[in-house]
Amino acid sequence: MTEPTRPFAHVDESPEDVRKGMLDYLDAAAAHPEIQRVRADALEALAPAAGQRLLDAGCGAGEVARLLRRLVGPAGAVTALDFSKEYVAAAAARHDGDPVDYVVGDITALDFPDGHFDGVRSERVLQHLDDPDAAIRELARVTRPGGTVCVIDTDWASLLFDGVDEAVVDELVTTIAGTGLWRNARMGRSLRGRMVRAGLRDVDTLPVTLRFTEADSAASVLPLVNRRFATPLAGMLPERLVTAFHDTVDASVARGDFLAAFTMWITVGHVFS
Ligand SMILES: C[S@@+](CC[C@H](N)C(=O)[O-])C[C@H]1O[C@@H](n2cnc3c(N)ncnc32)[C@H](O)[C@@H]1O
């Protein structure tokens, strides 16, 4: 076994097949109805309006930034920022519609003036960071007084299965927790407290539980269930455990009783005005 890495924290340092696999994973997740459900709720929370200047920090392939661009209209502006040069290039290559600023940058040290944006969002990014509170402080700093900060993240500690061998799942989850592969397994539930402590006002949070009754469908959103990631995972976790997990998922699929669920949290706060 090798030391576990957190590929989404350092995309450009990962091997090419892993980078490509992660981009495919982002695309599959973006197309999944459960992620679309979360994004629709998050959009309502951010409430983009015509003429606004918005930021999507940790934009991945940039599809949400392009949606925001359509919503703010010709007088608005959207910046799509990511730490990965490769993903920023991929996002820019997919561009259509009115211009979006695609920029490489670090969410914990943003190169924008104070109060530059009317609203900012960041989805499934803080869980990968060493200093997620620095990211919240930066998102708040670059948002104008009265503007909105919307952070969406997973709570991996809420992950549950049914239909599979509980002992295998318990061992797998405990092993992953011990490796640090999930840098911040409770990020989702902690967002509200982090934003309150960062001085944001009227902080509210919405839990959205995603559920999957088909393993193939779950694999689009849950890397653990995705066979494509079995080899890299087996490099970081005991191979027999990864194999035992896929075997018990297969048995559950054969019986038709597979179930997986976890909660994502959409948290919104406002900058003091
Ligand atoms: C799981 S992906 C989510 C991408 C996108 N928000 C989505 O929902 O599809 C995490 C993204 O965060 C980016 N990222 C990681 N660390 C970052 C940092 N310090 N600053 C900005 N982006 C970062 C990664 O490059 C990756 O694109």
Image (spheres, grey):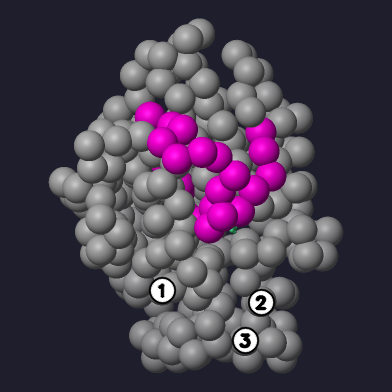
In the image, residue 25 lies in the stretch drawn in magenta? no
- Measured as percent of width and height from the top left, residue 266 is found at 30, 49
Quick check: 88 above or below 241? above
Q: Secondary structure at mark 3?
A: loop
Q: Secondary structure at mark 2?
A: loop
In the image, the segment drawn in magenta is 102-125
Please name the residue that numbered disc 1 is placed on: 185
Three-letter amino acid code of the residue under disc 3: Leu
Three-letter amino acid code of the residue under disc 2: Thr
Residue 218 is at least partly visible in this image:
no
Please name the residue that numbered disc 2 is placed on: 5
Quick check: 149 above or below 49? below
Seen from this angle, which residue lies furthest left?
202
Q: Residue at x 69, y 87 (%)?
A: 3
Q: Earlier in the sequence, mark 1 or mark 2?
A: 2
Disc 3 from disc 1: Cα separation: 17 Å
- Measured as percent of width and height from the top left, residue 265 is found at 30, 55
Residue 5 is at least partly visible in this image:
yes
Disc 2 from disc 3: Cα separation: 11 Å
Please name the residue that numbered disc 3 is placed on: 237
Q: Residue at x 71, y 59 (%)?
A: 11
**Is residue 253 or residue 1 the one in the foreground?**
1
The answer to whether marks 3 and 1 mark residues whose Cβ atoms lie closer than 8 Å is: no
Q: Which dot marks residue 222?
A: none
Q: Earlier in the sequence, mark 3 or mark 1?
A: 1
Which one is closest to the eye, mark 2 or mark 3?
Answer: 2
**Is residue 178 or residue 204 the one in the foreground?**
204
- Measured as percent of width and height from the top left, residue 217 is found at 49, 52
Seen from this angle, which residue lies furthest right?
16
